């Protein structure tokens, strides 16, 4: 019986969809006087129960707008769920939104420290891994250049190198990574593969059924913010295929 | 308690990185670098000095200055007010839009939201401490020029108003950061309010000028302003009469000005604590909703 590393219990995430967003005092006052403030509720996620054991590779399937990204953000802690509890154990490496927190005015090396700090690394850890990060991103020559002069490929290479320098317990992947050119893509996939080999727990979001079948042993299928199928990856993929074909 | 320490350990590096980022980025693009934070308050104070001593006839002869401001020259008087006010003004102004400014981070990674206003305040505090060099320079120069007595050990007491200023600013910033996220136009409203605050802090005139004016009640309103209390006490630490000894001055009306006022200190501290409590509660209650508004 392996250990549970991630558990979501009755998680729900509610958004207020006002047809017109009130975000200034003036508008709020006018609407208040006219008694016109309404809040349309929208549950992006509802009654989500997931239990992920160590070493599981969970595929998350669903059409656009099913709540996949919201679910990942709840798991990563970006959103605090409106209801329910999220239990996580260990280091989470969310390989989504690589390079969040990069500052365009900052140089490459400054951004390594900044982004590392944002990801929760310690200063000591980054100093130790600094050379490794620079080497992996192949940006040795550009470390003193402000990030605004980087190409988008360079930025994502740097982001990837920083985010994967840690050995995570839970890896969150949104689609298979396509970072940089073919050569770097190969390298990055090798890196992710090496994490897989070390038995990391994976959460994988994809539209590609084949990839999910290859990669995952378990899967869930989301529709309108609810789990409509969960269990063995093959079975869930079958349900998903039927959904698409109907 | 141990949870608090763990939390602090975990996020102190992010905090220091955010503070560093603010400082580095502000001065990277300017040739004068950090000297701007020295030059800016100095130049503003010179302007204020000339406007109010030459045009309006304040300041006046050295004897008159001493009588009015305790053992302090008008320039130092202005500079203190200006520096303390600027720290508060700059921090609170930035905090009204601090959450939106960091929207890209908030939307993408898990990070305690209070780190943004806190790092902003700390960054401004560092600049404030740097700009105190100007104050020291000007005060020492004028001390020799106008032959004034050396400051006493009482000068170390200025830690109290400085700490109080930080607490007051922190409370205000928390409230403004919360409100400013939901109401974008708060920024403009706050700017107007800070203009009022500029006059209500008695930056370039002594309050007894108002007490003896046609509207003495205005002085009471000003004294209700915690920032005024903080600034006044800071001035008393730099130059005032006795700290514990109640010394009578020849000009009777000046007394309130030149004593370190414990009542002011207590009042400003109480106001700061109340603001921090309100701000912390408001911030905590709403921080999960910030992401939906940025």
Image (cartoon, helix red, strand yellow):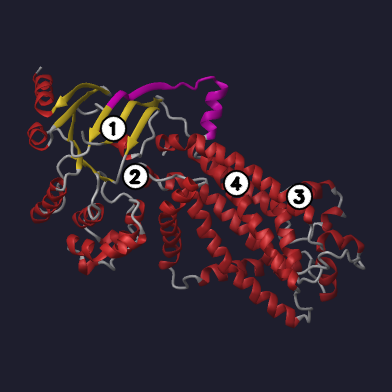
Magenta stretch bounds = A25-49
Q: Which residue is mark 2?
A: B109
Chain letter for mark 3: B
Q: Which residue is mark 3?
A: B222
Residue A116 sits in quarter: bottom left
Residue visible at 16% across and 50% down in the picture: A179
Q: Earlier in the sequence, mark 3 or mark 4?
A: 4
Q: CA distance from mark 2 to mark 4?
A: 26 Å
Quarter holding the C terminus of chain A is: top left
Element type at mark 2:
loop
Q: CA distance from mark 3 to mark 1?
A: 52 Å
Of residue A207 and residue A72, the one placed in the foreground of this image is: A72
Q: Which residue is mark 4?
A: B172
Question: Which one is in front in this view, the residue at disc 3 or the one at disc 2?
Answer: 2
Relative to B95, B76 lies left or right: right
Instruction: Same chain for labels 4 and 1? Say yes or no.
Output: no
């Amino acid at each position: 019986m392996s250990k549970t590393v991630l558990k979501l219990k009755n998680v729900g995430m509610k958004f207020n969809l006002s047809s017109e967003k009130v975000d200034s005092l003036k508008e709020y006052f006018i609407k208040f006087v006219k008694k016109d403030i309404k809040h349309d509720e929208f549950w992006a996620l509802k009654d989500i129960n997931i239990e992920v054991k160590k070493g599981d590779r969970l595929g998350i399937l669903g059409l656009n707008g099913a709540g996949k990204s919201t679910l990942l953000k709840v798991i990563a802690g970006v959103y605090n769920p409106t209801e329910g509890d999220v239990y996580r154990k260990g280091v989470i490496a969310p390989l989504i939104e690589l390079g969040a927190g990069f500052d365009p005015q900052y140089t490459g090396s400054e951004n390594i420290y900044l982004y590392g700090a944002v990801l929760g690394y310690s200063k000591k850890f980054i100093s130790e891994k600094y050379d490794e990060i620079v080497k992996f991103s192949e940006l040795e020559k550009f470390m003193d250049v402000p990030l605004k002069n980087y190409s988008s490929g360079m930025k994502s290479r740097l982001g990837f190198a920083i985010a994967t320098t840690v050995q995570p317990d839970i890896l969150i992947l949104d689609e298979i990574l396509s970072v940089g050119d073919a050569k770097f893509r190969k390298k990055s996939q090798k890196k992710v593969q090496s994490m897989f080999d070390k038995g990391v727990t994976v959460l994988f979001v994809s539209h590609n059924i084949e990839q999910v079948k290859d990669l995952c042993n378990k899967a869930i299928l989301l529709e309108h913010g609810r789990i409509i199928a969960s269990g063995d990856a093959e079975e869930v993929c079958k349900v998903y295929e039927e959904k698409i074909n109907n | 308690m141990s949870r608090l320490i763990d939390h602090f350990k975990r996020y102190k590096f992010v905090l220091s990185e955010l503070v560093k980022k603010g400082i580095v980025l502000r001065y990277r693009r300017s040739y004068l670098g950090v000297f701007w934070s020295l030059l800016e308050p100095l130049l503003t104070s010179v302007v204020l000095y000339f406007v109010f001593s030459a045009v309006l006839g304040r300041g006046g002869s050295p004897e008159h200055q001493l009588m009015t401001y305790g053992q302090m020259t008008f320039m130092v008087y202005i500079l203190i007010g200006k520096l303390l006010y600027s720290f508060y003004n700059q921090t609170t102004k930035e905090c009204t839009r601090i959450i939106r400014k960091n929207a890209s981070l908030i939307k993408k990674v898990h990070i305690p939201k209070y780190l943004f206003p806190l790092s902003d305040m700390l960054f401004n505090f560092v600049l404030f401490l740097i700009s105190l060099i100007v104050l020291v320079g000007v005060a020492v120069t004028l001390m020799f020029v106008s032959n004034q007595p050396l400051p006493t050990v009482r000068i170390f007491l200025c830690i109290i108003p400085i700490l109080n200023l930080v607490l007051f600013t922190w409370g205000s910033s928390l409230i403004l950061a919360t409100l400013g996220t939901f109401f974008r136009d708060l920024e403009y409203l706050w700017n107007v309010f800070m203009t009022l605050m500029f006059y209500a802090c008695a930056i370039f005139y002594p309050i007894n000028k108002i007490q003896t004016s046609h509207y003495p009640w205005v002085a009471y309103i000003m004294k209700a302003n915690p920032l005024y209390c903080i600034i006044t006490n800071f001035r008393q630490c730099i130059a005032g009469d006795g700290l514990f000894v109640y010394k009578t001055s020849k000009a009777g009306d000046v007394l309130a000005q030149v004593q370190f006022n414990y009542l002011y200190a207590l009042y400003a501290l109480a106001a700061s604590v109340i603001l921090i409590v309100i701000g912390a509660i408001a911030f905590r209650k709403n921080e999960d909703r910030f992401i939906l508004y940025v």
